[in-house]
C-alpha cells in the first residue's frame, strides 16, 4: 500500500468519522510528535482501529487486528487498505508480531489491542501476552489510550471519548523468549495505564482485577 493512499484514506476518515460520531479527545498534549510509538487501548468497537490512527494523522500506523474484522464489509476493506495485518489468534503464528516490532524500530507507530477482542460487557478484559511481548522486546515508548462510550454498542452520533495518557517505557529485555514472570509484570503495568484512563463503569470486574494481581505472585 502506498503512502499516498494511506494519507488519502486518513483524510477521508477525518471527515467521515466526526459525521458518524461525536468524538471528544482528552490528553492530546500527550500525543508524540515523532513515530516509533506503540499505542495500546481497550477495545470497544470496530471503529477503534480507525479512531486511534486519526489521533496522529501525519504518522503512519501499523495495525494488528483480529482476522474476523476483515470480513466486516466497509470496515474490513478499509483495514486492508490502511495496511492492517490480520492475526489468527488460534494459529500461533508470530510473524505479524515480528513485522510489527520491525515497523516500530523503523519509526512507524503501531496499534494493538491487548485484550485481543472487543469487550462484551464494556469492561476492560484481561490483557494477552502479545502486546507485553512486543513492548518488552522493543523497548519503545508506549502510549495508553482509553476509549469509552455509553451502552454496549456504538450507534449513529454516539458520543465517544478518547483519553490519551502520558507515554511510558517498558524496560527492554534481551531475552528472545521472556519468562512468564516478566510478561506478567509488563502486562500488569500496561493494564494499570489503560485503566487510569477509563471511567468507573469500564474498570475490570473485581474478579478479573484480583486475578491479574495474583498473576504476579504465581
Image (cartoon, rainbow, N blue to C red):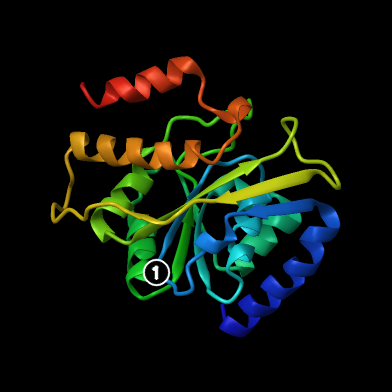
User: Does the rendering let one see residue 5?
Assistant: yes
Q: Image quadrant for the C terminus? A: top left
| Quadrant assignment, res 2 | bottom right
Q: Is residue 133 above or below residue 81?
A: above
Q: Image quadrant for the N terminus? A: bottom right
Q: Is residue 2 above or below residue 56?
A: below
User: Which residue is rendered at x = 81% and y = 64% of the image?
Assistant: 16
Number of dots carrying numbers: 1
User: Which residue is rendered at x = 76% and y = 72% of the image?
Assistant: 12
Nearest the viewer among 85 and 186 is 186
Q: Is residue 110 left or right of residue 173?
A: right
Nearest the viewer among 197 and 19 is 197
SS at circle 1:
loop
- Where's residue 128, x and y in %? 39, 37
Which class describes the residues within 10 Å of circle 1: few (<14), some (14-19), or many (20+)?
A: many
Q: Is residue 194 above or below residue 142?
A: above
- Where's residue 63, x and y in %? 51, 60
User: Does the rendering let one see residue 90?
Assistant: no
Nearest the viewer among 121 and 82 is 121
Q: Is residue 107 left or right of residue 22?
A: left
Q: Which residue is mark 1?
A: 36
Q: Is residue 212 left or right of residue 43?
A: left
- Where's residue 144, x and y in %? 47, 50
User: Which residue is rendered at x = 36% and y = 25% of the image?
Assistant: 212
Nearest the viewer among 123 and 175 is 123
User: Which residue is rendered at x = 32% and y = 60% of the image?
Assistant: 98
Amino acid at each position: 500500500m502506498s503512502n499516498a493512499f494511506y494519507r488519502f484514506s486518513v483524510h477521508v476518515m477525518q471527515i467521515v468519522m466526526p459525521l458518524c460520531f461525536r468524538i471528544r479527545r482528552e490528553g492530546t498534549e500527550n500525543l508524540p510528535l515523532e513515530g516509533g510509538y506503540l499505542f495500546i487501548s481497550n477495545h470497544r468497537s470496530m471503529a477503534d482501529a480507525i479512531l486511534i490512527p486519526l489521533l496522529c494523522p501525519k504518522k503512519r500506523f501499523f495495525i494488528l487486528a483480529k482476522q474476523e474484522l476483515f470480513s466486516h464489509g466497509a470496515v474490513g476493506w478499509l483495514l486492508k487498505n490502511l495496511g492492517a495485518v490480520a492475526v489468527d489468534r488460534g494459529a500461533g503464528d508470530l510473524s505479524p508480531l515480528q513485522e510489527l516490532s520491525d515497523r516500530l524500530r523503523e519509526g512507524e507507530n503501531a496499534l494493538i489491542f491487548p485484550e485481543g477482542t472487543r469487550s462484551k460487557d464494556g469492561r476492560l478484559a484481561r490483557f494477552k501476552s502479545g502486546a507485553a511481548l512486543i513492548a518488552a522486546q522493543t523497548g519503545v515508548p508506549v502510549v495508553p489510550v482509553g476509549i469509552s462510550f455509553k451502552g454496549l454498542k456504538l450507534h449513529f452520533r454516539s458520543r465517544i471519548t478518547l483519553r490519551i495518557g502520558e507515554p511510558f517505557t517498558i524496560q527492554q529485555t534481551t531475552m528472545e523468549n521472556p519468562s512468564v514472570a516478566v510478561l506478567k509484570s509488563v502486562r500488569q503495568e500496561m493494564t494499570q495505564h489503560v485503566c487510569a484512563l477509563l471511567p468507573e463503569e469500564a474498570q475490570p470486574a473485581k474478579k478479573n482485577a484480583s486475578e491479574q494481581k495474583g498473576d504476579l505472585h504465581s
